[in-house]
Image (cartoon, rainbow, N blue to C red):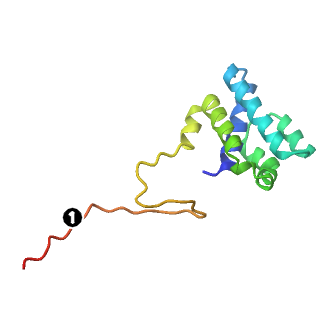
Amino acid sequence: MSGLELIVAALAAGASAGVTNTATAAVQDAYAGLKKALRGRLGDSTDAWQVLESDETQPDVWRARLGDQLITSGAFENADILAAARRLLTAADPPAAKAFNITVETNHGAVGEFQAPVTFHQGPTVPPTPPAAS
């Protein structure tokens, strides 16, 4: 899942927790922290700041209202912002947070950044061919 999807899911989860009044101090702090990090990255865009002040509970609405600015500003790939979004999503909606966790057991030689979806197929291990008899 992309950084943009992670950020909008976290914002929606933080807003949802606040709406139901079940938000713990950790959720409230994480939500405030993500919004503060985004404000710093989005600069002087009063439109973006107004969107951040709303407590929308649907990720698609966040994406529609803020997505372009998150992409243009580079927020969707900023390590600090993504870390803040992960913290918020983990605290506010643990089941949703699991969807964003990727565990790589082994990379089978695939290293680097991929700019498109990549699929790796690994069949059964083939034993090496024994040396020919002389």
Q: Is residue 39 above or below residue 119?
A: above
Instruction: Tell me residue 23's x, y (percent).
Output: 69, 22
Quadrant of residue 24 within the rendered picture: top right
Residue 15 appears in the picture as rendered: no
Instruction: Tell me residue 127's x, y (percent).
Output: 21, 64
Residue for point 68% across, 36% down: 84
Q: Is residue 128 above or below residue 90?
A: below
Q: Is residue 128 above or below residue 19?
A: below
Instruction: Tell me residue 19's x, y (percent).
Output: 75, 26
Relative depth, front residue between 42 and 59: 42
Residue for point 67% across, 45% down: 79
Relative depth, front residue between 4 and 114: 114
Quadrant of residue 129 within the rendered picture: bottom left
Q: Which residue is mark 1?
A: 127
Side (left or right) of 86 relative to 37: left
Quadrant of residue 30 within the rendered picture: top right
Residue for point 7% across, 79% down: 134
Q: Secondary structure at mark 1?
A: loop
Instruction: Tell me residue 101's x, y (percent).
Output: 54, 42
